[in-house]
């Protein structure tokens, strides 16, 4: 068969019901092109390759899993990309959807990759460590609300779909998991530039215990910092608040 590599954060799905629920979740919104991230042993792949009229590709870093998948599912020939999603070029030149039981050790980095590709990504359905999924979906005022929450929610609507226990995987991880879905927002809040937004959000949350006035004082003039809004902490500002503030940055 194949070996499991801890270095790649491999915990493979074995619960068929969970696999079927994920596939159903993708199918709730129409798509024509699909990229699976980290197919591993093919738990999801065996369902995805049966989807009709879909241009399917999968990206897998582990050469052993590539060999295994091609042996098990010959129809995957020409559809497997032997690379890391963090380094590969964008896989389609038209809108596409992503799905995957994302490797937990790079799941946040995968989301930043999705943000890079956001103009072509029409949906993401992914399995994350439960705490990460909660962070992505968190709203302002929550202790789990942070950089990922704001940056992802600026561009995507986040749906927290369902949770998955560790017994659904081989080997069982020491944490529980959750599946979320991202769909592009129809209206994106106005912001000065992505560079300004990313800088503001990261600076604000890097000192999240401080009042915003002290955390981001290098980004605004002393006069602007007199605004009562800066009496709040980063976790109290909405996505729209952060977007609006970028227009006032020095």
Image (cartoon, grey):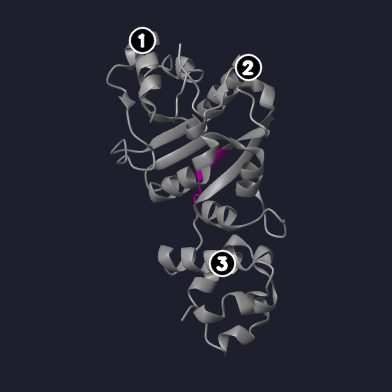
> Dividing the picture into quarters, in which one does residue 131 lie?
top right
Q: Would residue 184 be counted in the magenta stretch?
A: yes
On the question of residue 241 being in view, the answer is no
Q: Nearer the viewer, residue 113 or 29?
A: 113
Asked if residue 188 lies left or right of residue 209, the reply is left
Q: How far across and down, in percent of the image, does residue 39 sit? A: 45, 24
Find the distance from the CA under tag 3 to the CA under tag 2: 40 Å
Mark 1, Cα crowd under 10 Å, few <14 / some 14-19 / many 20+, is few
Q: Nearer the viewer, residue 3 or 245?
A: 3
Compared with residue 132, is residue 203 higher up or lower down, i.e. above or below? below
Compared with residue 170, is residue 217 higher up or lower down, i.e. above or below? below
Q: How far across and down, in percent of the image, does residue 202 sit? A: 53, 64
Q: Would residue 55 be counted in the magenta stretch?
A: no
Q: Of the residues tagged 2 and 1, which is closer to the observer?
A: 1
Find the distance from the CA under tag 3 to the CA under tag 1: 49 Å
Mark 1 falls on what kind of element? helix
Mark 2, Cα crowd under 10 Å, few <14 / some 14-19 / many 20+, is few
Where is mark 1, residue-wise? 71
Q: Nearer the viewer, residue 22 or 11?
A: 11
Q: How far across and down, in percent of the image, does residue 109 sit? A: 47, 46
Q: How far across and down, in percent of the image, does residue 22 sit? A: 57, 25
- Magenta region: 181-186
Q: Earlier in the sequence, mark 3 or mark 2?
A: 2
Find the distance from the CA under tag 2 to the CA under tag 1: 24 Å
On the question of residue 232 being in view, the answer is yes
Q: Earlier in the sequence, mark 2 or mark 1?
A: 2
Mark 3, Cα crowd under 10 Å, few <14 / some 14-19 / many 20+, is many
Asked if residue 56 lies left or right of residue 129, the reply is left
Where is mark 3, residue-wise? 242
What label does residue 17 carry, if any? Answer: 2
Q: Of the residues tagged 3 and 1, which is closer to the observer?
A: 1
Q: Residue at x 32, y 41 (%)?
A: 90
């Amino acid at each position: 068969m194949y070996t499991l590599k801890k270095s790649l954060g491999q915990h493979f799905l074995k619960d068929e019901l969970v696999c079927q629920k994920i596939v159903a979740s993708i199918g709730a919104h129409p798509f024509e092109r699909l990229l699976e991230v980290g197919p591993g042993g093919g738990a999801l792949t065996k369902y995805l390759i049966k989807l009709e009229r879909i241009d399917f590709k999968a990206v897998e870093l582990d050469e052993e899993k590539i060999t295994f998948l091609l042996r098990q599912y010959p129809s995957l020939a020409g559809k497997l990309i032997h690379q890391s999603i963090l380094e590969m070029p964008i896989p389609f030149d038209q809108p596409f959807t992503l799905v995957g039981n994302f490797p937990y050790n790079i799941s946040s980095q995968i989301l930043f990759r999705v943000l890079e590709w956001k103009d072509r990504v029409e949906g993401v359905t992914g399995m994350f460590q439960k705490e990460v999924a909660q962070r992505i979906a968190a709203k302002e005022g929550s202790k789990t609300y942070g950089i990922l929450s704001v940056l992802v929610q600026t561009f995507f609507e986040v749906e927290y779909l369902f949770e998955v226990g560790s017994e659904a995987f081989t080997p069982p991880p020491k944490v529980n998991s959750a599946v979320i879905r991202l769909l592009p927002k129809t209206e994106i809040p106005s912001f000065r530039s992505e560079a300004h937004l990313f800088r503001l959000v990261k600076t604000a949350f890097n000192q999240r215990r401080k009042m915003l006035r002290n955390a981001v004082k290098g980004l605004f003039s002393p006069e602007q910092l007199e605004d009562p809004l800066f009496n709040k902490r980063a976790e109290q500002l909405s996505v729209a608040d952060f977007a609006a503030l970028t227009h006032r940055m020095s």
